[in-house]
């Protein structure tokens, strides 16, 4: 098995492991319930020896044909009916029920009949089998043999007679035939495991949500520029807080890798304007914009982030800014000065181990606002006040001129826009230098990915890249 196949099955277990474990657990409990609710069955057994004698020859132990004949006779309803009559059990049992639970085993070239009888009662199992033995041997002597003087077999010259003798009297076998709780539970668990694996495979095969980087690239038809782990969702970037919160250890490496891929990958990149959209709502575009903008600024770039998703503005929360401040809507619709709307964000350079370099803290008193110092800068244009028609704001030529103006003063202008299916961001796609589509692992499905791919293709976008959020691991 190669590494990719091994990884595939590991991913399957991580996604569907609960189902693979749940089904056997249910099966084991069902097996336990059945085993403890089923009445126990006990077995009595005995051994008979059959043979024949005739003419002047000495008695001969039975042949294969004889033992088969005797087997058929002992399992006849005649024997069972007579045994039930003698035991006064005709009211509760039928001859057919007796023969159904009575088995006769004969080894090859043997004249020994091993007879067993199963019953829910220990005493009844022995009694019924004992009476069957008595009735059968009596009928053999009466119908097929010549008897005189007790149990001594005699024959006349030239006549064939048959005999059946009880060698091992009826007795109860140790233990019980069924149920066996441990065996039942073990078998139920094995069957449950098989069913659980099959259900997991079936469920996984019809699950059309993105589960890996490869799926994202195949379904979007575009390269994955980077990933962002689950711990980044809803958290302020470490470069703003000055420390890495518990569970965010993988965020830094993911952010820096995304920054490097963005800076050194030329796919669909013609300039500073980066449009960040998504396949559906709440895929994590604001988290990507906030973390990417902060990382680029820490790396020495002049960055402006624009909160253009006025339907669900979230960027200001990630960057710790006031949503009541003058913003994009106020600049476009009310003519507010751009300089008044742009809000600077102070950052701290966080090392890969989650600590602040000494150069960043020297000379700063406790409580002072941290600053970027010799690094780049990060400014943010929040959404501003609400508007009745967000689509009209994004389609306004004044917004395009505004973005052009910002692009002249910044190394990167990162615009957080609504999802592609809403259509609000369509007027900005063709003018963007690079389009990043954010997809959420475990949520974005194949149909949505295909729809985004077709839409962006029709809008003549100069290629786009994918950023995968809620990723289980940081993928290079």
Image: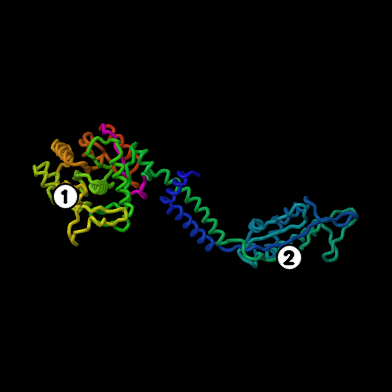
Q: Residues within 10 Å of mark 2 (few under 14, many from 20)?
A: some
Is residue 301 found inside the magenta-colored segment of the image? no
The spot of residue 83 in percent (x, y) is 70, 62
Report the magenta residues as a range.
460-476
Residue 426: x and y, percent?
22, 36
Pinpoint residue 186: horizontal percent, then vertical percent: 54, 58
**Mark 1, residue position:** 344
465 magenta-colored: yes
Q: Assign a secondary structure to mark 1.
A: strand
Where residue 431 sits in the image (x, y, percent)? 21, 34
Occupied quadrant, residue 235: bottom left
Q: Locate the C terminus by quadrant.
A: top left
Could you tell whether 25 is left or right of 104 in the image? left
Seen in the image, is 183 located left or right of residue 86?
Answer: left
Q: Residue at x 52, y 59 (%)?
A: 31
Q: Of 68 and 230, which appears nearest the observer?
A: 230
Q: Is residue 367 above or below residue 415?
A: below
Q: State the residue position of label 2.
A: 169
- Nearest the camera: 328 or 164? 328
Name the residue nearer the viewer: 402 or 22. 402
């Amino acid at each position: 098995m190669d590494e990719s196949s091994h990884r595939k099955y590991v991913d399957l277990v991580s996604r569907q492991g609960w189902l693979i474990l749940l089904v056997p657990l249910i099966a084991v409990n069902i097996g336990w319930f059945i085993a403890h609710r089923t009445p126990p069955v006990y077995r009595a057994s005995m051994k008979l020896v059959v043979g024949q004698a005739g003419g002047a020859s000495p008695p001969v132990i039975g042949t294969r044909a004889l033992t088969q004949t005797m087997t058929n006779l002992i399992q006849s309803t005649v024997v069972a009916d007579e045994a039930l009559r003698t035991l006064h059990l005709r009211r509760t049992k039928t001859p057919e029920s007796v023969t159904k639970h009575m088995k006769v085993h004969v080894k090859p070239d043997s004249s020994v009949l091993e007879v067993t009888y199963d019953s829910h009662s220990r005493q009844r199992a022995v009694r019924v089998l004992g009476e069957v033995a008595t009735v059968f041997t009596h009928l053999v002597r009466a119908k097929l043999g010549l008897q005189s003087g007790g149990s001594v077999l005699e024959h006349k010259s030239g006549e064939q007679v048959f005999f059946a003798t009880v060698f091992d009297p009826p007795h109860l076998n140790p233990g019980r035939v069924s149920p066996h709780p441990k065996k039942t539970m073990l078998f139920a668990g094995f069957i449950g495991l098989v069913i659980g694996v099959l259900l997991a495979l079936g469920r996984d095969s019809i699950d059309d949500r993105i589960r890996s980087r490869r799926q994202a690239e195949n379904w979007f038809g575009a390269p994955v520029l980077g990933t962002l782990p689950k711990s980044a969702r809803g958290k302020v970037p470490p470069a703003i807080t000055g420390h890495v919160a518990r569970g965010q250890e993988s965020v830094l490496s993911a952010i820096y890798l995304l920054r490097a891929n963005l800076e050194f990958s030329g796919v669909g990149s013609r300039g500073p304007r980066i449009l960040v959209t998504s396949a559906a709502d709440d895929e994590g575009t604001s988290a990507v914009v906030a973390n990417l903008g902060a990382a680029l600024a820490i790396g020495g770039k002049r960055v402006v982030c624009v909160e253009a998703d006025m339907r669900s503005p979230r960027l200001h929360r990630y960057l710790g800014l006031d949503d009541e401040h003058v913003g994009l809507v106020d600049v476009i619709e009310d003519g507010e000065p751009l300089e008044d709307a742009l809000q600077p964000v102070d950052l701290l350079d966080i090392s890969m181990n989650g600590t602040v370099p000494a150069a960043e803290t020297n000379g700063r008193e406790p409580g002072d606002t941290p600053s970027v110092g010799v690094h780049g800068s990060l400014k943010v244009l929040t959404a501003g006040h609400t508007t009745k028609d967000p689509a009209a704001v994004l389609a306004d030529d004044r917004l395009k001129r505004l973005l052009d103006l910002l692009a002249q003063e910044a190394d990167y202008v990162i615009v957080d826009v609504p999802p592609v299916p809403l259509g609000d961001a369509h007027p900005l796609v063709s003018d963007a230098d690079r389009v990043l589509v954010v997809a959420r692992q475990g949520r974005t499905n194949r149909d949505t990915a295909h729809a985004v791919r077709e839409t962006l293709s029709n809008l003549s976008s100069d290629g786009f890249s994918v950023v995968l959020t809620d990723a289980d691991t940081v993928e290079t």
